[in-house]
Image (tube, helix red, strand yellow):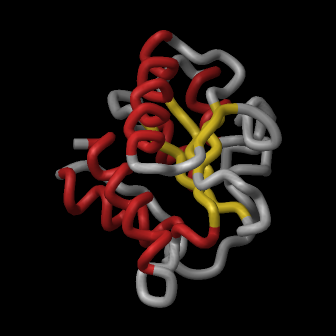
């Protein structure tokens, strides 16, 4: 499951909104500094708390790495603290910071925060996004995210 599928499944189960890309992308909305179509759509939903889900390869020890962004509000810090507590209680390895701290100006999280919104970047290990082939590592992470968002 890619991060878009993960975001859509979580949104469906929690009654939230998921904004994902369908088809081929012409750039990378989390890297490009320009306000492309995806960022414009995110910014058009200023009333929402943005949980910006991305993935990283499996060679890291962490299951989740949270990016607080360049201007984390008290709400962002509280969201991160709660996710860390929930994930840790389920035996997952989670932390904040580099290399996925979301401070790069091109990130969705940075874009939303600079515009005055609330956003947290959630980076998910590849081993935790494989419900069919790796259910033993996917289920605990999915359950933690579901509990956190509920």
In this view, 7 is above or below 62: below
Residue for point 66% across, 32% down: 96
Q: In front here: 37 or 131? A: 131
Q: In front here: 32 or 12? A: 12
Q: In front here: 29 or 53? A: 53
Q: Is residue 75 left or right of residue 102?
A: left
Residue for point 43% across, 19% down: 78
Q: Quadrant of the C terminus?
A: top left
Q: Position of residue 51 (x, y in %)?
A: 46, 42
In this view, 16 is above or below 86: below
In this view, 44 is above or below 90: above
Q: Is residue 72 left or right of residue 79?
A: right
Q: Position of residue 34 (x, y in %)?
A: 76, 44
Residue for point 47% across, 63% down: 20
Q: In front here: 29 or 66? A: 66
Q: Position of residue 99 (x, y in %)?
A: 81, 42
Dividing the picture into quarters, in which one does residue 124 lie?
bottom right
């Amino acid at each position: 499951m890619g991060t878009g599928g993960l975001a859509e499944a979580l949104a469906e189960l929690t009654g939230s909104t998921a904004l994902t890309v369908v088809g081929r992308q012409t750039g990378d909305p989390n890297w490009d500094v320009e306000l492309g179509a995806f960022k414009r759509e995110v910014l058009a939903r200023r009333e929402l708390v943005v949980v910006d889900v991305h993935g990283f390869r499996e060679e890291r020890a962490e299951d989740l790495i949270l990016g607080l962004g360049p201007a984390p509000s008290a709400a962002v810090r509280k969201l991160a603290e709660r996710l860390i507590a929930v994930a840790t209680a389920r035996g997952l390895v989670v932390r904040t910071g580099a290399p996925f701290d979301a401070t790069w100006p091109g990130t969705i999280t940075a874009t939303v925060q600079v515009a005055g919104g609330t956003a947290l970047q959630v980076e998910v290990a590849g081993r935790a996004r494989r419900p069919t082939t790796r259910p033993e590592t996917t289920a605990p992470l999915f359950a933690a995210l579901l509990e956190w968002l509920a």
